[in-house]
Image (cartoon, rainbow, N blue to C red):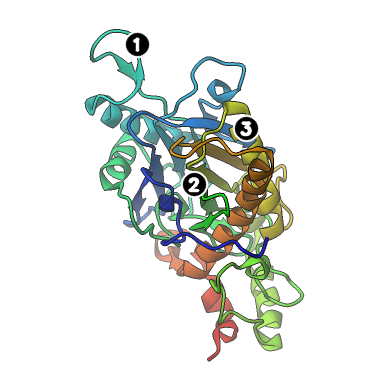
Amino acid sequence: MTDLRPGPLNAITDVAGLRVGHAARREPGWLTGTTVLLTPSGGAVAGVDVRGGGPGTRETDLLDPRNLVDRVHAVLLGGGSALGLAAADGIVQALLDDGIGWPMGVPGAVVPIVPGAILFDLGRGGVWRNHPTASDGAAAYAAARGGEVPMGGVGAATGARAGGFKGAIGTASVVLPSGHSVGVLVAVNSAGSPVDPRTGELYAVRHGLGGEFDGVGAPSADEVTASRAYAATLGAEGQRPAMATTIGIIATDATLTKAQCQKVAGMGHDGMARAINPVHTLFDGDTLFAVATGERPAPDLMELFALMAAAGECVTRAIGRGLLAAESADCSATGGVVLRSYRDVFPSAFGS
């Protein structure tokens, strides 16, 4: 489909009514964070698809098409492994304070619906038990805005690692010929690598849209060789099980059912597989949510096909854009890790 183009911001917030907020903890001993996507106040229809072998999630059963509640008011992406799910409490309380939630039939009585997923970053700042809490969720909620979305090592990806590289949050969008918009937000913390070990190229760069990866080429052979030597020095910490997971959200302004949202999320995993190898391993809890705001009409069958395909492509592109925005992180002074960004490992990929 050659007539596709990114949205004005090339971000998930190109879907009208969505807001994104990040909160990060980078003080000594810390390297973790929280991200929230806020839907319009009336909520959005949602689905989820969990593929990894080690997921950490909240409220995913509620999104089963067979179950009653069909609206969510926010989605949490967070660090901290299972401990980081506590950040959702801060988001729920903030929504409750604002009177936003599933109506319970009595004025003022609402229950905010906030599904979420976490990635594993414990100990990367140097102190194992440092993880996001409810206060971090509240901070992310307070920071939520429309407009441009910060990318790189922010929010849920503050302590993320992608293979042997600094992980990141990325975002991307597309406008379809039907007029529907699709946007994606992904936090990459994968066991697999986003980089082709033979060439040093990001897999995602091959799927760019609208020139978004112009100026990114193949790095020099010397840097590729050096990167292999660097990977060999990562040691046991880099091989420890369950220290991974890529999580994200696909959004559209189309009117979709819960079952259709679930299928959109599933197609998104195809995009993840194009950008990371291997993916969906036993050490990853790879999870994608899909939300539909219903601002535009329901697509016909062929428009729905195009929307689902575009969702997967957006995931691939968002992963690449996030990794290109990442900056290296060094927490070795507090007993944590050193995470080198793709740009720092392969500077020659960004020639004139």
Amino acid marked by disc 2: Leu
In the displayed structure image, the side of residue 308 where residue 93 appears, left or right? left
Residue receiving disc 2: 122
The nearer-to-camera label among 3 and 1 is 3
Amino acid marked by disc 3: Gln
Amino acid marked by disc 1: Met
On screen, residue 201 above or below 21: below
Structural distance between the alpha carbons of marks 2 and 3: 34 Å
Q: Which mark is residue 206?
A: none
Structural distance between the alpha carbons of marks 2 and 1: 38 Å
- The answer to which image quadrant residue 350 occupies is bottom right
Q: Earlier in the sequence, mark 2 or mark 1?
A: 1
In the displayed structure image, the side of residue 201 where residue 29 appears, left or right? left
Structural distance between the alpha carbons of marks 3 and 1: 26 Å
Residue receiving disc 1: 104
- Along the viewing direction, whichever of 290 and 190 lies nearer the viewer: 290
Can you give x and y, in whole percent of width and height, for residue 126 in the image?
Answer: 44, 54
- The answer to which image quadrant residue 85 occupies is top left
Q: Which mark is residue 260?
A: 3
